[in-house]
Amino acid sequence: MQKILISGGNGFLGSHLCDKAINEGLSVTVVDDLSTSKEKQVPKDTHFIKKPVEKFDTKEKFDFVVHLAARPSPDDYTRNPLATIDSNDVGTRNMLEIAHRSNATFFYTSTSEVYGDPDVLPIPETYFGYVNPNGARSCYDESKRFSEALIKAYERQYGMDVRIERPFNVYGPRIREDGFYGRVIPRFIDQALRNKPITVYGDGKQTRSYLYFADWLEATWKFLKDPKAKGAVLNIGSNAEISVMSLAEKILNITKSRSRIAYLPPREEDPKRRAADISLARKILEWEPEVGLEEGLVKTIWWLREKNRL
Ligand SMILES: NC(=O)c1ccc[n+]([C@@H]2O[C@H](COP(=O)([O-])OP(=O)(O)OC[C@H]3O[C@@H](n4cnc5c(N)ncnc54)[C@H](O)[C@@H]3O)[C@@H](O)[C@H]2O)c1
């Protein structure tokens, strides 16, 4: 039986990856400190270790080592900059060491934030980024960039099989909606379902592109397993750009909410536009996103409505 170690496996993306790995017959071990998870949501057959990844080590060997543990919500990471950096410097190094000793495939979820505030759209992997090394978001975007450098150093030094994914705004069931953790889609849905003000940072003209988790999972599983993807750095996202204001209006329409829009001051260094160039992922993984935004939103709204009885 093949073995997979997943850091951050209790989170939104990690828990879906655990389900997939178990369904595919792998033995799954998760290391997660539950710092950004609201509840335990790993499948029951998972070997769960509650620990920060930066303090984790094991003598066990694995076929796949997947490093997802991070604090990806801007409102949360700007409040916890040191903890955010920890999972991407020491945490990444610990997971790389385990992968190296195991002769495993190492898989990392970096982020579209490595591109900063880009002047190229949609953004190809060859764009090096426009990032402030010491700005409010640097604890996340620069430490993700450092992780990428560290991973490529292990590849160059030891010839390891490494794969780096840059996800662009993935959403869907199990994404956290509350407090500082709520990223834009679950936060808007939660606010709309409660008829509370929809909180938009700045003028809402900033754009993003959104990917439904099922499309992410399909791409990620292929990326993890396909020999053609060894050494690749791939954007996994959507190229359909939409403004935050249009997103809010879509959610208001679908939920038939009475909420109004409440404008908050703009977030420091919030990128103005973002959309993924996914030509490389299409070519290497023979993958195409299938779930449109409208369909994905309806499914996510249904899930949140059921979960919180709204
Ligand atoms: N969801 C997205 O749109 C998106 C976009 C870009 C990148 N990513 C990356 O994908 C990965 C997973 O994101 P997610 O959306 O599932 O986030 P999430 O917050 O739902 O999950 C992260 C998990 O990691 C755990 N964790 C955090 N810090 C830890 C630490 N130091 N030690 C151990 N566990 C820790 C949390 O408890 C949580 O269970 C992250 O690396 C994130 O940066 C996600």
Image (cartoon, rainbow, N blue to C red):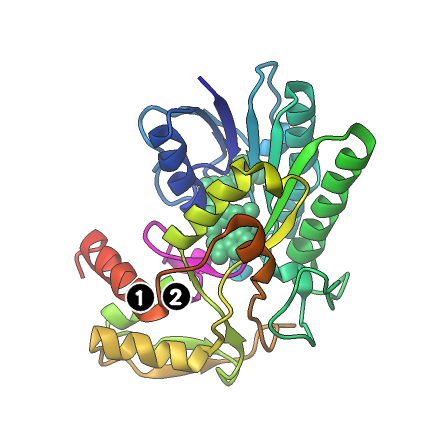
Query: Which numbered dot is residue 185?
Result: 2
Vertical placement of residue 145 versus 263, above or below? above
Query: Which numbered dot is residue 297?
Result: 1
Residue visible at 72% across and 61% down in the picture: 126
Residue visible at 49% across and 75% down in the picture: 241
User: What secondary structure is the stretch in magenta mostly built from?
Assistant: loop
Whether label 1 touches label 2, CB < 8 Å = yes
User: From the image, which quarter does the N terminus lie in?
Assistant: top left
Whether the magenta-drawn stretch holds residue 174 is answered as: yes
Q: Secondary structure at mark 2?
A: helix
Q: Would you say residue 28 is visible in this rendering?
A: yes
Q: CA distance from mark 1 to mark 2?
A: 8 Å
- Closer mark to the observer between disc 1 and disc 2: 1
Vertical placement of residue 76 versus 66, above or below? below
Determine crowd level at label 2: few under 14, some 14-19, many 20+ residues with C-alpha closer than 10 A. many
Whether the magenta-drawn stretch holds residue 180 is answered as: yes
Most extreme residue toward the top is 59
With 29 as the anchor, is 62 left or right in this view? right
With 9 as the anchor, is 250 left or right in this view? left
Q: What span is colored magenta in the figure?
A: 167-184
With 192 as the anchor, is 71 left or right in this view? right
Q: Would you say residue 78 is visible in this rendering?
A: no
The picture places residue 12, in percent across and down from the top left corner, at 41, 47
User: From the image, which quarter does the C terminus lie in?
Assistant: bottom left
N-terminal label among 1 and 2: 2
Residue 288, quarter of the rendered image: bottom left
Residue visible at 53% across and 49% down in the picture: 285
Q: Nearer the viewer, residue 276 or 285?
A: 285
| Amino acid identity at mark 1 | Leu
The picture places residue 250, in percent across and down from the top left corner, at 32, 78
